[in-house]
């Protein structure tokens, strides 16, 4: 069967004006030569180094209004190629002043999203290689390095043995939740779920303090918001209450529903609360529920032996994920995730297309990571994790984590020393939730004024219904001086607001 | 309310041995200094340039067996930090020889996954900034550049006006399908879907030739495999047949089911078939179905005016996605996706957590991209798309795309000139499906022998039940010589296999 070369409708001109230069050689596009790349690459490296050095002189967040940046950009792409110099200039002049500088030492909002020299260098090399491991065969060393370095990290964190060999790097902890729920549904309902889908029979349990990704994951997985039970937390620790969990499961069973999974958290987004995994794990075992643990921000703290207690109960977990792009210096995105039994997720997500049959192998000996995640393509993120773990070593990582914890302790101590303020929740990690002993409006105004200074950036949350400020230590460049300076600004602004002083 | 500084169980030693050096300064971790970064960054840039220059001398795919790379890596992370020199050496010595070299000019399998100098430079800068736009406020310029550059690309591709302002960059086309299905379910079923989930009432339609991501997306969305109707294709064009689509929808309606969406393809993964969008769009309109179009590989060809016909019918699409990391030189991952009405997806996926309330704005004026995608965090991928579009300009991009199409035409011509071979499907883009006029075993053996040479890498698929080889042109470094050389190897191996000659 020989077929024509195209399938354009008849009457459509499909002649291709292949560009050829005068000497008969192919013209093609003007790609950047290796020498040009060396030249501009060195300048880009120097730009990054100077950017890092100059961060303290920039406002942490930009004083811009919506549309202001876009209005400075032309409405159309250029017809012909531009010199790289123009790109770099416009980047520096138009774009960078409109960014929030997450690497600024005064960026203390949300959670830190840290990177480091070795991580950035690894990202450069990864971009140059531009390879990917959707199956083992599509880039063997990428897959095998990922397996190995995930075992390294499990060992560093003192994770239960059951996670050995079960690691994969997801983009984010949110995607990890989607994958965990799919695996849980498959384990509970098998072909019935895979063939006929989710719906309102299956129920999942978490706390009111879980990351919003839990709700998005439940919704994306077709469970429906109402089937995700947001259970009350202890008003002081902000942690899930096992008695409430057990009651909710039993009530659902009585109603003929099918409990599937619990999403518990080590270090909630709002206040870094730690759900009581040992008791939750017992309940999951009793009812054969999948236990997914989200340690996005705080989980890596277990690399410090004195923080190892946060792992208590992880031996019950079926899946666990952390974001090394938060506190562990690998740059965004990098979310290590472990499965106790990865065959469950690969069975849940395998689709076996004919065009990949040739490059698909046995799942356990050589994993095909496409079946461990939402997308088909699997980026080579293991390199930056490998470089980061090796550059810092276990002791270097611990020193970084301990510094963040110590900064939070210091900040909380200063807050407690000022009777106008209160600390609003426990702070076992690098985050301190605090507020003025005043109404929500005063606290919201304080936050707005602080962030408008450009000196620092804090974020906010709601703790027990009250507006609360969040200061997150742990940034790569944040030192004790920055924490003390932040506190100075906070109490000065409070005084200016008329809050005593 | 003042609370204690930690929540460790009593009896656990939580004292933090904060490291301090002798002079009382904080020790913290040994971060890479800016000067060290300059030094190693220049070397990393030079490594990348030399890697690109040396690619022709490497085997395209590595001669390794599963476990071989992992066995060379230590079982544990180092206790103390290592010098960057060791990392770079081990990368070069242990990892790179075990990778598949997707940028090799002889990498002709799957689809090309192209990158370019400007894209890699942008990725370097992005890694250095390490910012992210989950909401507009978390990095305003990142969001606004993304909006603008997505409008640029829509304009370059000649997309319908309805997509203006509706662009977002996803990681991959697979994730785009998940998001499209969630939006479709929300539009069809509203609160009923959001509150109570998916399940076996809702049906989705695609062809047997759709990417495997369609099945994964349906399964992840809780629809169930059986609710994704894989409809037969035309045996010659491999395209979805509208009459079959209409019959399937009507049958499901008669059975009391709820048709929700059609996933159509411009350039299927197996053979680059193009589904007849005008007729499919009419059917979607008649039955109020969401039309998602997957143009992952081929969609960007519309940048060439003579290929603009592939857009025919896109005016019916509710969502459309392409992968610029395939043919358009931006590096992995970069999947532009457009919505005709983005408020549908933001309503479908919004979760509005309290800890982001302060930084959340009106969705249309300044999009919060967290509600347009699976994850919460949104990487700054717009920079590499911006750099790539500007470096090449519209004409440069066209020259690159035309070269890939021309190489495929040339290759198909050579295949047709050898009576031992046949072209197995139309090749409107850069992919040629071909095979020996022999049984599957002979074709599979030919492929294995070709790929074992290390000179080139082809992939395979099944066309109408028969094993078929795929040669994909369009790689950044692939020239006409490489295509001619590939053909020489193919016919020589065929002769060695005893296939005449």
Image (spheres, coloured by chain):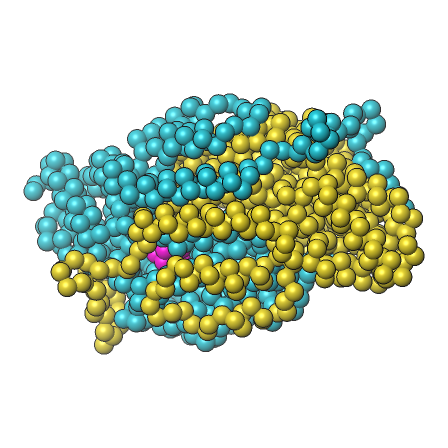
Chain colours: A yellow, B cyan
Viewport quadrant of the C terminus of chain A: bottom right
Q: Judge from the rendering whether residue A379 lies leftward or rightward of residue B477; answer left or right.
A: right
| Residue reaching furthest to the front | B23
**x, y percentage for residue B268?**
35, 57
The answer to whether residue B442 of the structure is visible from this angle is yes
Q: Nearer the viewer, residue B233 or B174?
A: B174
Identify the residue at the far left of this view: B501
Q: Residue at x 53, y 32 (%)?
A: A391
Instruction: Give the left or right position of residue A465, taking residue A315 as reference.
Output: right
Report x, y in % for residue B215.
Answer: 46, 52
Q: Quadrant of residue A137?
A: top left
Q: Residue at x 57, y 48 (%)?
A: A52
Quadrant of residue B346 within the rendered picture:
bottom right
Left or right, B202 with respect to A315, comes to left
In the image, residue A13 sits, relative to residue B413, either above or below, namely below
The x and y percentages for residue A282 are 73, 32
**In the picture provided, is A484 more to the left or to the right than B151?**
right
Whether residue A296 is visible? no
Residue visible at 12% across and 40% down?
B492
Q: Is residue A145 above or below residue B236?
A: above
Q: Residue at x 52, y 71 (%)?
A: A72
Q: Is residue A156 magenta?
A: no
The correct choice, above or below, for A410 with respect to B238 in the image is above
Q: Which residues are magenta?
A: B324-330
């Amino acid at each position: 069967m020989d077929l024509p070369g195209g399938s354009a409708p008849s009457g459509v001109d499909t002649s291709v004006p292949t560009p050829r230069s005068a000497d008969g050689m192919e013209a093609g596009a003007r790609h950047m030569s290796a020498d040009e790349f060396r030249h501009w690459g060195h300048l880009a490296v120097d730009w990054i180094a100077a950017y890092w050095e100059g961060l303290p002189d920039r406002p942490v967040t930009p004083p811009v209004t919506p549309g202001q940046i876009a209005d400075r950009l032309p409405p159309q792409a250029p017809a012909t190629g531009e010199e790289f110099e123009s790109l770099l200039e416009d980047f520096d002049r138009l774009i960078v002043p409109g960014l929030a500088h997450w690497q600024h030492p005064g960026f203390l909002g949300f959670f830190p999203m840290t990177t480091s020299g070795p991580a950035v260098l690894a990202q450069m090399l990864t971009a140059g290689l531009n390879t990917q491991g959707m199956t083992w065969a599509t880039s063997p060393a990428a897959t095998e390095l990922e397996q190995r370095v995930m075992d390294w990290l499990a060992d560093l964190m003192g994770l239960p043995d059951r996670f050995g060999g079960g690691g994969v790097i997801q983009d984010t902890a949110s995607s990890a939740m989607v994958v965990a729920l799919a695996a849980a549904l498959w384990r509970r309902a098998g072909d019935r779920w895979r063939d006929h889908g989710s719906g309102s029979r299956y129920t999942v349990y978490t706390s009111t303090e879980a990351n919003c990704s839990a709700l998005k994951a439940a919704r994306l997985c077709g469970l429906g918001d109402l089937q995700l039970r947001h259970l009350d937390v202890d008003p002081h620790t902000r942690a899930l209450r096992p008695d409430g969990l057990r009651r909710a499961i039993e009530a659902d069973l009585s109603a003929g529903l099918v409990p599937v999974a619990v999403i518990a958290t080590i270090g909630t987004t709002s206040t870094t609360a730690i759900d009581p995994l040992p008791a939750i794990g017992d309940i999951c075992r009793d009812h054969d529920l999948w236990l997914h643990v989200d340690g996005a921000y705080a989980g890596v703290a277990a690399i410090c032996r004195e923080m190892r207690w946060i792992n208590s109960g992880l031996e019950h977990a079926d899946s666990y994920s952390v974001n090394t792009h938060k506190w562990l210096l690998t740059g965004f995105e990098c979310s290590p995730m472990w499965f106790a039994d990865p065959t469950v997720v690969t069975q849940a997500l395998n689709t076996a297309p004919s065009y990949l049959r040739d490059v698909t192998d046995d799942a356990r000996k050589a994993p095909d990571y496409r079946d461990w995640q939402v997308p088909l393509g699997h980026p080579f993120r293991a390199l930056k994790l490998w470089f980061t773990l090796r550059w810092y070593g276990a002791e270097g990582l611990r020193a970084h984590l301990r510094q963040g914890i110590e900064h939070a302790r210091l900040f909380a101590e200063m807050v407690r020393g000022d009777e106008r303020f209160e600390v609003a929740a426990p702070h076992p990690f690098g985050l301190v939730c605090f507020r003025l002993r005043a109404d929500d409006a005063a606290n919201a105004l304080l936050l707005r004024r602080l962030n408008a200074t450009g000196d620092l950036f804090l974020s906010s949350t709601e703790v027990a219904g009250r507006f609360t400020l969040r200061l997150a230590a742990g940034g790569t460049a944040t030192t004790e001086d920055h924490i003390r300076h932040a506190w100075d600004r906070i109490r000065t602004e409070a005084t200016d607001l008329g809050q005593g002083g």
